Amino acid sequence: MIYRIYAMLLRYSYVLRRSWPRLMELFYWPTVQMLIWGLISKFMINNSDFSSLVLAMLLGAVLLWDVMFRSHLGVSLVFFEEVYSNNLGHLYLSPLRPYEHIVAMLLISFIRTLIGISIAALLAYLIYGFNLASVGVSLIGFYLNLSMMGWSLGLVVAALVMRYGLGAESLAWILVFALAPLSAIYYPVNTLPQYLHKIAYMLPATHVFEGLRYSIEHELIATDYLLQALGLNIIYLALAVWFYLYIFNVVRRAGLLLQGGE
């Protein structure tokens, strides 16, 4: 099992290393978003009563939001490439098991996201003097929780593309951005209408971003927020894995593994 997972990681790393556009894409969008929001925040600080605390909260939110976004794309786009190259059927004709493929996709997603966010975080420190590590130990929990939520979304999208073909590929963008307003990324949950609060708190990301603001403001570990996010993520990731494996069995029995069109 370990050797098959390692073989898939090598495959994905070779594709990444030999394509400079793919490498550039890892850090391009995180960096652009960080620069834009950083400049907006600095303008607001210089022309209003906003404090440097707000700048830290916004930059932290921008960088961590991209963790979830990149983790999601790290799974779904890697899967799409197998479909684009008509390689999915060949993969599953090999000794590779579906759950091993899942593990490999999650690991390469983690590596891709770590590379992109590390570069953006370094630039945030050099340009704005914002050190993401100043969030403290909570940062590890925030990162892992947002990665898990991104993985769950990515697996669901990959399963739908496996079942319905590349016509469902746009869900990779629709799904994650549809959840963004409810995730309280740049504002507290109380900013949302009251009837949306319960829905927002069903998302692990909401607890993460509320915890981020709490950690920056009070300089404490956001234990409660992290535990709530982790509990939800365990449930959602388990459901996403089950859904992927269920769809795989449906597709395999129907003989659709070789489909790659709309």
Image: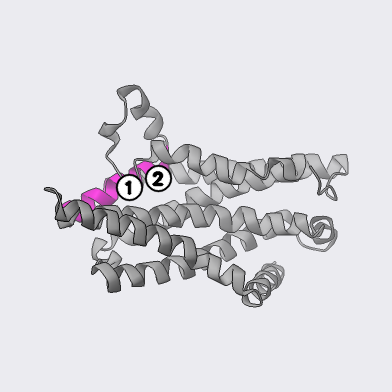
Residue 250 shows up from this direction: yes
Q: Secondary structure at mark 2?
A: helix
The answer to whether the residue labelled 1 contacts the one labelled 2, judged by CB atoms less than 8 Å apart, is yes
Which quadrant is the N terminus positioned in?
bottom right
Relative image position of residue 10 (x, y in whole percent) = 67, 74
- Main SS of residues in magenta: helix
Which amino acid, mark 1?
Phe
Vertical comparison of 189 with 27: above or below: above
Q: Nearer the viewer, residue 113 or 262?
A: 262
Q: Nearer the viewer, residue 231 or 164?
A: 164
Q: Which mark is residue 190?
A: none
Residue found 65% across the figure and 41% down from its top: 243
Quadrant of res 164: top right
Relative image position of residue 16 (x, y in whole percent) = 63, 72
Count of marks overlaid on the render: 2
Q: Which residues are magenta?
A: 203-225
Tag 2 residue: 205
Instruction: Report the Cα–Cα distance between label 1 and label 2.
Output: 6 Å
Residue found 31% across the figure and 67% down from its top: 124
Vertical comparison of 64 with 207: above or below: below
Relative image position of residue 90 (x, y in whole percent) = 84, 60
Label 2 crowd bin: few (<14), some (14–19), many (20+), radius 10 Å: many
Quadrant of res 251: top right
State left or right for residue 172 relative to residue 3. left
Vertical comparison of 133 with 43: above or below: below
Q: Secondary structure at mark 1?
A: helix
Residue found 79% across the figure and 42% down from its top: 262
Tag 1 residue: 209
